[in-house]
Image (cartoon, rainbow, N blue to C red):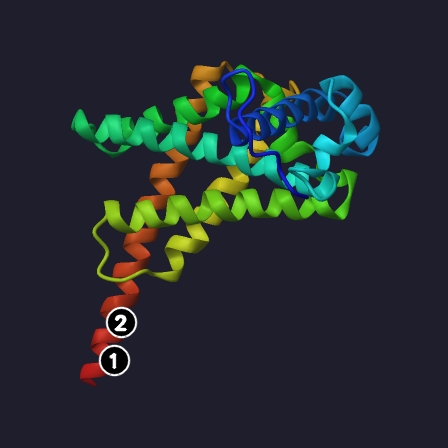
Amino acid sequence: MSHPKRPFLGESAATRVQNRRQTLLDTAFVKASESGWKGLSIHQLCLDAGLNKRYFYESFKDLDALAAALINDLTAQLVQVGQSAVFSGLQEGKETLPLATQALRASIGWLVDDPRRARILFSLANDNPGALKHRQNVIKTLAQTLSAFSIEYHQADEPHVIAKVGSAMLIGGTIEIVVSWLDGNLEVSLDELVEDVAHFWVAVGESAISLTQRRLDERSQGGKG
């Protein structure tokens, strides 16, 4: 679809398109968290957003494309929150456990401050195959981010498979724990939850380092023989 190019009331055409896109995303965030993706239609979404339907198609091919964009935006925000907390902790010279605690407190805090974020990212996967794929992509993105950081943090000579295995396990498990906590199935405070998860993260990381070193030693000894 062609976009208008002339400025209007001091705003460029590109800015107006971006503002309408964000309005649709914000509206979808509210509606999807209330009734799920199945309860969403382009017609109703545009009514709630106060926009003509043609403005939907200037930014999105269909509802699945809008869902992907919303989930991608939320994922990027979550990654940014975690990375900012890690960077701040590294600047402060924090050791591994305090660093993990700070990063998890920020990340989990961002999710539970507005539970709709966790619901859209992780709890609406049963709505349709597209939503399930989006959930898998979120987990993959978060796991890749964690894996890349862990390899750099521990100054690994090369990327080891155990880093990917451990990251996928930690991310998937933490997501389930957070969702369970939000559903009221875990009777612990938020501070206790963060502390517990941080200890597990560090324990898994230390185990991964130990296992990696053992495998490298075994390969080295095998090569000598």
What is the quadrant of the C terminus in the image?
bottom left
Q: Is residue 201 above or below residue 20?
A: below
What's under tag 2, amino acid-wise? Glu
Residue at the image position 82 percent from the left and 34 percent from the top: 38
| Quadrant of res 116 | top right
Q: Is residue 113 above or below residue 43?
A: above
Q: Which residue is mark 1?
A: 222
Q: Position of residue 169 (x, y in %)?
A: 49, 46
Label drawn at residue 218:
2
Q: Position of residue 180 (x, y in %)?
A: 62, 27
What's under tag 1, amino acid-wise? Gly
Position of 168 with respect to 55 (left or right) is left
Say if mark 1 contacts mark 2, CB within 8 Å.
yes
Label drawn at residue 113:
none
Position of 86 with respect to 3 (left or right) is left
Residue at the image position 59 percent from the left and 26 percent from the top: 22
| Quadrant of res 198 | top left
Q: Secondary structure at mark 1?
A: helix
